[in-house]
Amino acid sequence: MHGMRLISVLSICFLLSGFSEQVSAESPFQQRVEALIRQDSLDAFIYTYLDEFLKDPVYERLYLFDEAGEKQWREPRSAQEYLASTIFLCNKGYYNLKFSQVDEAVSAYESAWGYDQQFDFRDFDIIEYCLKPLGNAYSMLGDYTSAENTIKSYLLEAQKRGLKDQQTSALINLSIVYHDTGKNKEAIEVLNTAQESNSGSSGLIYSNLAKNHLTLGEYDMADRYARRAMALFEKAGADQSGYLSNIYSILSSVNLKARDTVEALNFLRKARSLMETGSTGKSRDYAKVIVQEANVLYAMGNSAASINIYRQALQQLIPQLGEKQLLPSEDMLYAENTLKEVFDGMAGAFVSLDSLDQAIDCYKKSFSVEERLKETYSYDESKYLQQGENRWRAEQVLDLCYRLFSLSKDIHYVREAFAVAERTKSVALRDKLYNRMTWEKFAGDSVLAGRRKLARHKAQVEAALVQEQLKGRNANLGTIEHLMDRKNKLTMDMKGLEKSMPRLTRQSHREIDYDSLQQKLKNNQLTMVEYFFGAEALYAFVLNGSSIAMYRNSRIAEVRENIVQFSALFTDEVKINAAPEVFAGLSQKLMGMLFPGKVKNTLLIVPDGLLNFVPFEALLTAKPSSADYSQWPWLINSNPVFYQYSGALYLHDFGQGRFADDKVLGFFPRFADSERYLKYSKDELEGIRKHFDGNFLSDEKATKQAFFNHASDYSIIHLSTHAKPGALYEPPSVAFVDSALHLPEVLGLNLHTQLLVLGACETGIGKLYKGEGPLSLASGFSHAGVKNIVLSLWKVNDLSTSRLMTDFYKYYEEQPQAHMALHRAKLAYLQHDEIAMDKKSPYYWASFVYYGQSETKDAIQASGYGMHMFFVAVALIAMALYLYYRRRR
């Protein structure tokens, strides 16, 4: 999923003539450097190092940039020094990109942009020499959110300055981001806009149009535009080899789709020959052409030959790869998308040769590269997009492991498949919690405090941006532009601070400790069922503390359709009562699909895909024998159920035990005298107050600011209010009496809440990302540090919610296990004599589900007390032995 060769920038060496001091030919370079350090002449020092590199700008001399950074004795102070640093960093970024060091180029360009934002050097073209290549570099890494934000930023700047050429370049580069993220129609629209104001970039516009039409399967259009571009580039002559080779690659793909493999190979060999004779012969683009040649050989059925060609691409990208070394070691890998293309291609070839274990090894290398790429991303949105590709790869491995296990019965393959499924679960959330856990060890550190301040400010800016964008045609474009600039700057500032902070991102993707997970499940008497909702099959892993089983249901379309029909019955309160037999049939059928074998104990469900919206407690284990819902054989009758976003998040308790007691911070805005009036919210408040002390804010006191003021002081937070799951351009939000709290603001919070109860509608609903799950209000609070959450899956009833919550807190006081308290509250609701039978439909009691840990606070404290007593006993025994031997002497 990679776009066309992006618009390159020329070296900006010519800019240096007016700034660079002449170095005496008789003076050795290092002597000159030391003299400038003694003179405290920072700008001359910077230009001297840059001049030295530019005398022979080859890969082997890139060390001079790093050496200059190491020797630089202070930060810039004057405008001239900042300008020198900006030019130096832009040159560093340019040559990092030229020699395929994309992540280092990003770092250099980001620093240069930061300097320019402080001084706004009007005599220096920051768009051409920094922002354009920075956006391109982000795209190369797959950080498409950063790429889009950067491109839009300099597009607005170019429009303000009336720079037509820069506007065209920005639109072309924006189209590449859209192509690479699957938005091909949007890309074509952007390119058509670029064509209207084009002044000399027709070849690039045509080539990008060709690429998008190719992806859409419109091969005649792709061929037409590619040949137009080819004619323009061939006519232009010099310095077009990179663009021409890209066109040859597109035409190769067009011919491959037409099954003309001979012509496809001919075009690729022309591209390869062009690059070998040009200046790009050792670039990542050359490796990409080699990969495409291998892909054609694979498509022709010549898998063995394709593997050899893939290895040639590997040797281009990793020169230190040994001649007899099939795959590189982990320490040779780096953040480069082309490496993934190589490993995935090799894996497919090995599968066709029936070398399934070697195919799995190749996919594992791709996973490792993915981790390195992810570490360069500034936005969670880029991680979500990356997950889509990663999930495809994970499903290939699961299929291979299932096939190998079926043949060999070696349980190793089941465990390996489970580990792969796990690594695709809630990646952004897991990264956030691992980093948070590390940073908490440095709670008093000024850098960490600065990062938190920036995070809060960024959340406020994002919330303001959302509010302005929701105004539609009445939105102020100047305000939007200002807020986008602030957001980009704050993101880069946070990224800069994080470079100096400890990170555990890659650790978060180490394989889950299988034995520890099984031990914890055994200790807590749980059965964990983890799902992987793939494009071709639904996989289920069942772990019970001592064994693991893997199931595969290849009737994925039927599973999907049943889930959609089942979930549709919960969209309003009359549907289940109107067709109870239909509901019962769907519920029982879905139970058989999701639980191939019998399950015992309390169930820990790790859902995936559409299963995130299924209330498992409302599944039926048998056909009902009466019309009375309270007598139906619900799964909840035999198995308490709770949920977690991944097995790793269950295994690792990220909560911070900083509260001495369980006091509740409650918000009950009620919205009296309005259509939003919550009549039974007051009953809910009084019911909770019977069992827990706390600060209960109702009506006009239940403000958003009060939440900000008090949220960090309580172990339990309860919100009895309205919520929205969000829409296309509107993020999820929860209502306070005066205003709403939107998801971007939630993500900027730093909470240590042990239990959050979201007594509102659809708080677990949001845009569904593969692997990550729904980006909902509830998941946002998890990102903010909340340990355990009660959330809702549809629009809840005010009265039934009040009853459920009252009983929940009653049982939580008796037995502080939230999952069991909610389980008992639901059973009590079903057996309540005063509730009418139609109100015992699962619509009324199954909406609320619990995500989190199973241990009680008392159990954790008891465990700590037990360890304390153990060490006391050891100390007493040691003292007794000491006194005994002393007497003997």
Image (cartoon, rainbow, N blue to C red):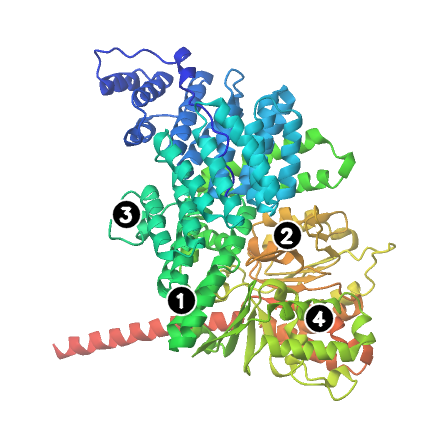
Residue ID at (57%, 31%): 228
**Residue bearing the label numbered 4:** 566
Quarter of the figure that contains the C terminus = bottom left
Give how far apart the Cα atoms at labels 2 and 1 are: 37 Å
Nearer the observer, disc 3 or disc 2? 3
Question: Label 1 amino acid?
Answer: Asp
Is 242 left, or right, of 684 in this rendering?
Answer: left
Is 484 left, or right, of 648 in this rendering?
Answer: right
Residue ID at (78%, 84%): 628
Disc nearer the start of the sequence (4/1): 1
The mark found on residue 710 in the picture is: 2
Give how far apart the Cα atoms at labels 1 and 3 are: 31 Å
Question: Label 3 amino acid?
Answer: Leu
Nearer the observer, disc 2 or disc 4? 4
Residue 794: x and y in percent read 72, 64
Q: Residues within 10 Å of mark 2 (few under 14, many from 20)?
A: few
**Residue bearing the label numbered 1:** 513
Q: Is residue 336 above or below residue 123?
A: below
